[in-house]
Image: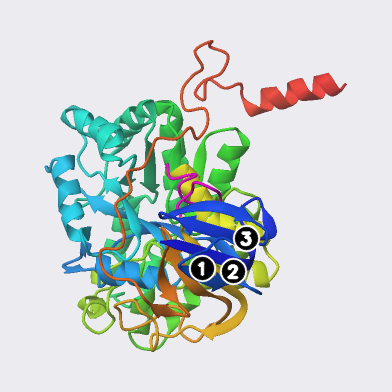
Amino acid sequence: MKTLIKNGRIVTAVDDYYADILIEDEKISVIGTSLTMEADKIIDAKGKLVIPGGIDAHTHLDMPFGGTTSADDFETGTRAAAHGGTTTIIDFAIQNKGQAIVEALDIWHKKAAGKTAIDYGFHMIVTDFTDDHIPEMKQMIDREGVTSFKLFMAYPGVLLADDATIFRAMSVAGARGGLICMHAENGVVINEIVRNALAKGYTAPKYHALTRPTKAEAEGVYRSIALSEMAESPVYIVHLSCYDALKKVKEARDEGVPVFAETCPQYLFLDYSYYEKEGFEGAKYVMTPALREKWNQEELWTGLRMNDLQTVSTDHCPFCFKDQKHLGKDDFSKIPNGGPGVENRMSLVYNGGVVQGRINLNRFVEITSTSAAKIFGLFPRKGTIAPGSDADIVIFDADKKMTISAAHHHMNVDYNCYEGMEVQGVPETVLSRGKVVIENGKYTGKAGDGQFLKRSTVNLGPTKAQEDGKFSIVNREPREARRLSEIKLHV
């Protein structure tokens, strides 16, 4: 099957030009001007952007949590992602306490097999990591194509890992070319604050936010970075929500520490005031970390613009309002944590970023696709438009406007966090490995179109001391001393 995309404006993380694209055997074959090859299908992209398919590196499909299961499975969730211009997701497989890591991965493979509309990979959530699990982590990285692992500083008794476990996992992963992703909040302290709030009769949804201070997130981020330095391993902070936490990332990156971080649309477009809605409406926005005060949003946009934040993922973990969120009707701590967003990410970020002048087109592509591909071992197969890359391509109408609503979204959930928001910039046609899965906004694919992606290890920066002994991320010269030497040099 040959497909020819004509007359489009191709935008990648580094390029912006007009050309045609020939697709053969699921790959981009030729890029050039005025291509005249015969093709089975011709797509006229005149007046449209032609961009790499989005990569959402943080989703939770068919995930058990809080006595229920996230409302989107791998069929409905990936179909919704495709509608929104995302052509790759990386979901989280969960190891339960006492379970073999390999066994947990097998369970998630079965959840996804034959269902997905787009390509997918897995991170592994590790809750139990003794010396006995070390060979399994090495197997994940070397043979299974699962090269990233998430550990939690939150949810004591369920997901929380102590510092020794985190350090052990970082040490093994870093030495093998893997990456540790951290849910960075001081969950032990948060649990104590929650216990005190409930004892005082504070049960409304807003107390989910009021019991999770930004300092608890900042402390978790700082501790994650410190542990990664001691382990000589890079670290990736998931769903960073506030300026207090961002400051810790920025300080470390300014020191040259290989720290990477994502934020999510909910922290760029929603804020604490949503918890103050009448009745139980605030439960729709119960997610972790919680929504923050509005002023944090511009700080996060600055972080994205200055590359202190590298990616925008969704943490898509939807629970229906009527049947699932109401499990916490009389106790905010029992409201299932999570919200929908996988379908709306690309349009939201384009509208809030490019249309409103916060970032340029190249940076839009970078934070929604290319950076995730590079960090998680998918580049250049994914995340760019180049000969030899997978033909994951979005024909994007940068002028079209749309009002977001649960009335017409494709996520399997009965509300939308961004209900009523008007956005400019809408995916029109979406190709996954050369196959059109969305055409003029209509789904044309089928369950099982997607493939599992084995991801490679990547060099994210100085993760080990150099063999010549000239550099170590553990034994760096203090910043103050470096500054002093720089002053002397200038003098």
On the image, the x and y values in percent for residue 447 come to 26, 68
* Quadrant in the picture for residue 255: top right
Residue at the (30%, 40%) spot, across then down: 145
Give the side of residue 175 with respect to residue 85, left or right: left
Residue drawn at x 54%, y 50% is 310
Does 177 sit above or below residue 47?
Answer: above
- Is residue 168 positioned above or below 241 on the image? above
Which mark lies nearer to you, 1 or 3? 3
- Tell me, yes or no, whether the two marked residues, 2 and 3, touch with CB atoms within 8 Å: no
User: Residue 383 lies in magenta, yes or no?
Assistant: yes
Q: Nearer the viewer, residue 39 or 361?
A: 39
* Helix, strand or loop under label 1: helix
Disc 1 target residue: 346
Residue picked out by circle 3: 35
Q: Nearer the viewer, residue 332 or 475?
A: 475
**Amino acid type, callout 2:** Tyr
Is residue 302 rendered magenta in the image?
no
Comes first in the chain, label 1 or label 3: 3
Helix, strand or loop status at disc 3? loop
Depth check, mark 2 against mark 3: the one in front is: 3
Q: Main secondary structure of the magenta part?
A: loop
Q: Which residues are magenta?
A: 377-390
Percent x, y for residue 430? 46, 69
Q: CA distance from mark 1 to mark 2?
A: 6 Å
Q: Amino acid at mark 3?
A: Leu
Q: Residue at x 38, y 51 (%)?
A: 185
Residue position marked by numbered label 2 in the rendering:
350
